[in-house]
Amino acid sequence: MNLPQIVEFLTNYPAIVSIAGIVLGLVWAISLAIIEFGAWILVSPGRAIKHPGEDPYPGVPIRATAGDGTVLAGTWHGHPEANGRTLLLLHGLAEQRQTMRARADGIYERGWNVAVLDARGYGESGGALASFGGREVADLRAWIDKVSTEVGPGMMLAVWGRSMGAGIALRAASEDDRIKALVLEAPYNDLHKTAITLLRRYRIPASRFFAVLVLRHARRLAGVSLHRPRPIDAAPQVNVPTLILRGTHDALISHEETVALGHAISGSVEHIEVEGARHSKVLDVGGAELIARVGAFLDNVPALAALQIK
């Protein structure tokens, strides 16, 4: 169709042209809404989430200052017989430290110091926007510096991260040899891949395309990349004993992804799959038995087991 024919068509069928314009406008508006909403979900978790009966969280308030001056909040549970064994707990997306209470209580009862942390932008921590590790990896180093002043030179450190927190913990362990063991609960190995899966769950067409745009916009909002380096890329630099926890009904992270992440880690890796558990329900389903298994893993890490009181 040449230009005169196009002009003639537009002149003779104005209703069709109007409808096409409206449809294209709607598609464009919906696309922008998906990108905007998806990006803000990642970087702005919403501090208003409360967990009745668990606030205020018991323990001694503790604060650390990030490299950019952001004040980070947590609670400290110092055990009189820890002998330096210390666990840091990192929550997942749209959570805060109260969601980690059962984990904290269970490991503390085994004779460990436990610090339960609010990520930047969450709970009582400062910072307007989260970044899935873009800044939180450095924040975790600031936390390790702070906790080491509480424990002293004999500190032997493990980190337990859930989902987003697992990605942060793994990336931090690839850079900081003060971390001697990892517990990765419902870990993702590539945030882009996870974003595609989530978009498909909501039946968003062209999910791969939208996932790229959502992460690009999230990077513009946060000022740093949310998904580079990917946990799967950082894993070969992790040379510490690692325990991976996954629910068999996890719709976000596949069994194959979890196995691939385990294979990529240089240190020894153990896997526990919790039958029937979804992505956010690993501990709810696994309960006290799962905490006991995690505790046994931590107690038997060679670098940490040597510190136990006999």
Image (cartoon, helix red, strand yellow):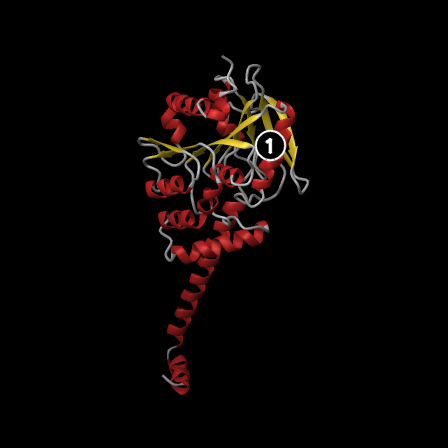
Instruction: Decide if residue 158 is in sight here.
Output: yes
Judged from this view, the residue extending furthest toward the bottom is: 4
Work out which residue is located at the far top of the displayed protein and give it.
310
| Residue 28, quarter of picture | bottom left
SS for dot 1: helix
Residue topped by disc 1: 144
How many badges with numbers are in the image? Answer: 1
Q: Residues within 10 Å of mark 1 (few under 14, many from 20)?
A: many
Q: Is residue 127 left or right of residue 4?
A: right
In the image, what residue occupies the spot 39% across and 27% down? 284
Q: Which of 178 and 131 lies nearest the eye of the viewer? A: 178
Between 248 and 53, the one lying in front of the other is: 248
Front residue (pair 281, 161)? 161
Q: Measured along the vertical axis of the image, is residue 196 above or below residue 287?
A: below
Residue 163 at x, y percent in the picture: 45, 38
Residue 202 at x, y percent in the picture: 37, 48
The quadrant of the image that shows the N terminus is bottom left
Q: Quadrant of residue 5?
A: bottom left
Examine the rendered structure and indicate whether residue 198 appears above or below residue 153.
below
What residue appears at the point 46 percent right and 20 percent down from the top-left corner? 106
Percent from the top left, x then y, of residue 286? 37, 26
Left or right: 56, with 254 as reference point: right
Q: Amino acid at mark 1?
A: Ile
Which residue occupies 58% across, 19% down? Answer: 78
Residue 264: x, y in percent? Answer: 41, 43
Residue 33 at least partly seen: no
Left or right of 297? Residue 60 is right
